[in-house]
Image (cartoon, rainbow, N blue to C red):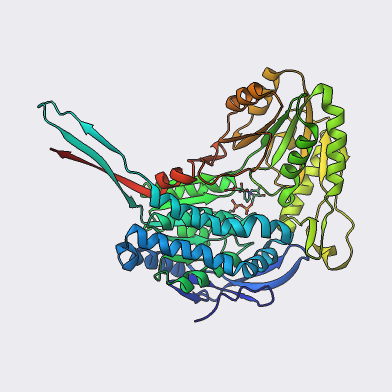
Amino acid sequence: MVSASCSPVTETILNFIDGSYRKGSEGKSFPNVNPATGTEIGVVHEASQADVADAVAAAKAALAGPWGKMTTAERVKLIAAVATEIERRADDFLAAEVADTGKPRHVASHIDIPRGAANFRMFADVVSTMPGESFNTSPPDGGQALNYTVRKPKGVVAVVCPWNFPLLLMTWKVGPALACGNTVVVKPSEETPRTAALLGEVMNAVGMPKGVYNVVHGFGPGSAGEFLTSNPDVDAITFTGETGTGQAIMRKAAIGVRDISFELGGKNPAIVFADADLAKAVEGLSRSVFLNTGQVCLGTERVYVERPIFDAFVARMAAAAQGFKPGVTGDRAYLGPLISAEHREKVLGYYRRAVEDGATVVTGGGVPEISGAEASGFFVEPTLWIDVAHGDTVMREEIFGPCCGIVPFDSEDEVIALANDTVYGLCASIWTENLSRGHRVAAAMDVGVCWVNSWFLRDLRTAFGGSGHSGIGREGGVHSLEFYTEITNICVKL
Ligand SMILES: NC(=O)C1=CN([C@@H]2O[C@H](COP(=O)(O)OP(=O)(O)OC[C@H]3O[C@@H](n4cnc5c(N)ncnc54)[C@H](O)[C@@H]3O)[C@@H](O)[C@H]2O)C=CC1
Ligand SMILES: O=C(O)/C=C/C=C(\O)C(=O)O
């Protein structure tokens, strides 16, 4: 078998189709760059339209093969084995993820890789324990009838992924899709192809039938992303990424009336009331602004602070921000790079725009001085702004970098209105020691997920997703089953 060639010291990253690693049939490839150093570390083989069609055909054929005939118990056993194998090869996944993203090893080893395994194990549990629905019905003739549901896989699911948490966000979709009996064709981000490719080795190692899991590499328009989402044999599309991309995919999904599940961008607010535990709020919010260098859809980019504690909060956040040192120091890094030179230019554009619009830079605002191999990495300084107006671009548009605007407020009603005045609706966090207020304000947030006195505290059984421009549908626990299965209601006249 040709291997995934995913170690950071080797160069070739291949497509995975019908259980085998393959070069692109048109001989096209593109470079794989380590964002921490800006250097080319591999070559990715781009899938042609014919390769994508092969992957979809393999996925379709697998539905009719041994995979489609397995009992839930047999399927779940294989999926649990995938989780165990990811854990056994955690070092390989870690190396692949760090090479692609440049993110600090401690971030990938604590968040990305364990979640990659947990996403399979958790959904194996969910499908094993999922009760069906049934109703005793009284027909007009005075007899009885029984209604009950059976769930079936939707079929071939296209999984289109972003680059910020490559393994985590891909398995968040592949785990439930396979647990429900579907087959998948994954299109990882062109920036981060390695862990999706490596997962092919895991699938083969545990004996997953050929064609159940496929990976095609490439870009969006005119490449693997578009080829996949417009293939008529794809039955459903799940996507995480930018809102504009979601709209493009939605147009393709309309052909053939295919189901979609979208987790898109955000401009997430945090609200800090004067009675908050300030130390906890600063610790939580500095993570929510700077974790993964701000490249988190759930990240906070707007912070509203009740006026009496505004100055103290800003001072403490500035101190916390200065503790995040850009650069990678051995195994321990404080703030990793942005994903690409292009993304850094986008983030720096917002840094400039904030100042042009009149913001005061509390800390950061530029490119750090770094020596050694990381000098040409895509780093930026962690950045905080005050004196930002509600209508300023940096308070309206998703930046996806390590920065936020901090704004004072005077009343609960005012801050709820400010927080909700956005086209997005992904998540929010509320910081207060007043429990009633915490519940009240959380319920008033127009978002899919709201944390009180925490952030990114995830229970994989809960509903996850956003409203407005932040997405369509919810995934997580039984909510994933709603998307990854079709229901047939059976009505039996007794
Ligand atoms: N989780 C999130 O909310 C994320 C948000 N973003 C935001 O999106 C911005 C752009 O990042 P990108 O990686 O370029 O996001 P993107 O949304 O363009 O790409 C995400 C995935 O969609 C694919 N894709 C792009 N256009 C497509 C099309 N027309 N049809 C099918 N597939 C398509 C890409 O190849 C990639 O696999 C970032 O600067 C950030 O603001 C990026 C990554 C994750
Ligand atoms: O915990 C999750 O399932 C998701 C976390 C992060 C994102 O969705 C994202 O940054 O895109």
- Of residues 52 and 438, the one nearer the viewer is 438
Residue in the image at 63% along x and 24% along y:
441
Q: Is residue 367 above or below residue 12?
A: above
Q: Quadrant of the C terminus?
A: top left
- Of residues 203 and 439, the one nearer the viewer is 439
Where is residue 378 shown, x and y percent of the image?
Answer: 78, 58
Residue in the image at 13% along x and 25% along y:
140
Where is residue 213 shown, x and y percent of the image?
Answer: 45, 65
Q: Is residue 263 above or below residue 4?
A: above
Where is residue 377 shown, x and y percent of the image?
Answer: 79, 62
> How many dots with numbers?
0
Q: Is residue 160 visible?
A: no
Where is residue 102 shown, x and y percent of the image?
Answer: 73, 62
Residue in the image at 59% along x and 44% along y:
458
Which quadrant would residue 10 be assigned to in this image?
Answer: bottom right
Which quadrant would residue 115 be assigned to in this image?
Answer: bottom right
- Of residues 207 and 215, the one nearer the viewer is 207
249 lies left or right of 61: right
Which quadrant would residue 198 be assigned to in this image?
Answer: bottom right
Q: Is residue 109 above or below residue 29?
A: above
254 lies left or right of 141: right
Instruction: Specify the farthest residue to the bottom.
Output: 1
151 lies left or right of 117: left
Residue in the image at 86% along x and 30% along y:
312
Q: Is residue 438 visible?
A: yes
